[in-house]
Amino acid sequence: MSNLTELTVAAIRKGVADGDFTAVEVAEAFNGNVAAADALNAFIVATPEKAIAAAEAVDAKRAKGESLGKMGGVPIGMKDLFATDGVQTTAASHMLEGFVPQYESTVSQKLWDAGAGMLGKLNLDQFAMGSSNETSYFGNVISPWRRNDANGVPGNAALAPGGSSGGSSSAIAARLCPAATGTDTGGSIRQPAAFTGITGIKPTYGRCSRWGVVAFASSLDQAGPMARDVTDCAIMLEAMAGFDPKDSTSLDMPVPAWEAGLNPDMKGKKVGIPREYRMDGMDDEIAKSWDDGIAWLKDAGAQVVDISLPHTKYALPAYYIIAPAEASSNLARYDGVRYGLRDLPEGAGLQDMYAATRADGFGAEVKRRIMIGTYVLSAGFYDAYYNQAQRVRALIARDFEQAFEQCDVILAPTCPSAAFALGDKTSDPLSMYLNDVFAVPASLAGLPAMSVPAGLNSEGLPLGLQIIGRAFDEQGVLNAGLAIEQRAGFTAKPEKWW
C-alpha cells in the first residue's frame, strides 16, 4: 500500500494482523516521512532501527500465530521526557544533552510490550515548561499548519504547534507517526492537540506511571496518548495505563477496556457548561465552536445543564505558584555533581560549579520558573503564596465535585485561540501563560480531560473542544469525545510544505 502513513492506529493494527501489509512496511513508510521532515524539527533523535526491529518482532509473532498485542505493528513517537534504555533522553535541555539512560520508563516499556515500535524521541519545551515549543534547547518545533490570509491563500508565518508536547502534535498532524506519547502538567497534551487538529487525552492523575519520566511538577505531571482520533487514544491509553509499584502516586486499579466500551450515544447523560468559561472578549470563533459542540452533544442525546465553577478565575495564578514551586525542588538535582552537564571553570569551587552548570544548562523559561518557585517556597512567603495556592487548589477540586453532582461530563473550549505565530508571545510570559486558562483547572483537580478537533477557523486553523470528566471516568470522556468527533466530521490535514 502506498498510503500507509495515512492510516490510524486501529487501521494499522488490523492491517498487520490481517496480513494486508507487514509491520516492517509500516515502519519503513513512517521512517521515510520522519527523514523527510527535518524542517518541522519535531524529532530530537530519530531511531529508525528501533522501529524496524520492533516491526520484525511483530511480523515474526504473526508468522507463528501468536498474539500481536494492543499496539501490534504500530510505530510511535516518544516524547523526549520518557527515559528510553540506550537512547538519549534530554527533556529538550542542554542540562541533559548526551544523557543515555540504562533503564526504560514504565510507560514506554508497556508500549513496547504491547507491540509498538519507536520512531524516535520527540522535541518539546525544555523540561516541559512552555506552551509553544519555543523553549527547547534543540530549537523550535514548527507546526505543519499554515494560516490563510483573507483570500484563503496560505501564508508563510511559522506557527506554534503548542506545548509542551509540540513535537508530538506536529509529528502526528504531519503524518510522521500515527500516535505519540505526551505529558500534561497544565494542558501540555490538550493545548497542542487543539492547535494541530489532533486528539489527546490527559487521564486521571495516577492512571499512567510517572516512573522514568523526567519530573516537572510531581503532583500535576501525567502521561497520556496523542493520536489522530478518539479510538486511537483509547487503544493507546489501555496499553500505557496500569498500576506501577515503583510510582507511589500510581493508582492501584484495574485498567478498563476503554476501546471496547466506546459508545457515542449520550442518551441519559448530562453535559455541564461552566458559565465562568464564557469570558469577556472571548474569540467569536472559539465561542461558535463551543456552541457547535453543545449542539452536537444534544444531537447525541445529551441534556445540557448550566453549571458554575466559581474558583476558575484563581486557577491560573494558583497553578503558576504550585507548578514552579515543585519544579524548583525537582530541578535542584541538576547541579553538575551526579549526572548531566558539568561546567567547572578553572580554579572554581563547588558553589562556582553549581552556578556555572545551572546558568549554562537551563534555558530562560526554566530559570524563570525555578526562581518563582524558590521565591514562593522561601520562609517569608511560603504561607502567603504556596499555602494559599494549595487552598485554592482544594476549592477548585471541590467546585468540580459539586458540578459533577449535576452532570456527567463538562464541555469547554480547549484554548482561548487558535495557533499563534512563533515569536508572538515570547516577549510577554504572562500572555503565554494565559494560553492555559481553560486547561489548568482540570489539571489542578487531577481529572481526566481530552481535546478533540471541532473544525477550522476562518484562517484555516484547527480549533479544539475539551471534555472534562469525573476522576477515573476516562470512558465517559472518551465517549463524549467520540460523539463530538462523529458529528464534527473533522478530516482536514495540513497541506505539505516541508
Image (spheres, rainbow, N blue to C red):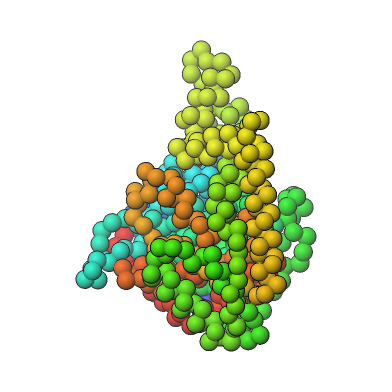
Quarter of the view holding residue 265: bottom right
- Observer-nearest of 441 and 473: 441
| Place of residue 137 in the rendered image (x, y in percent of width and height, measured from the top left) | 44, 41
Q: Is residue 30 above or below residue 137?
A: below
Direction from residue 402 to residue 159 in the image, left or right:
left
> Residue 279, how many percent across, how many down?
47, 63
Residue that appears at 47% across and 40% down = 365
Q: Quadrant of residue 60?
A: bottom right
Seen at 51% across and 12% down, the residue is 347
- The location of residue 387, given as percent across then percent down, is 67, 43
Q: Quadrant of the N terminus?
A: bottom left
Residue 31 seen by the camera: no
Q: Nearer the viewer, residue 70 or 308?
A: 308
Question: Is residue 137 in view?
Answer: yes
As drawn, which residue projects farthest toward the left?
151
The residue that appears at 69% across and 67% down in the rendered structure is 402
Give percent across and percent down for residue 203: 63, 63
In the rendered image, which quarter contains the C terminus? Answer: bottom left
Residue 192 lies, with reference to residue 130, above or below; the image says below
Above or below for 266 versus 2: below
Q: Measuring 54% from the left and 64% from the top, which residue is drawn there?
A: 276
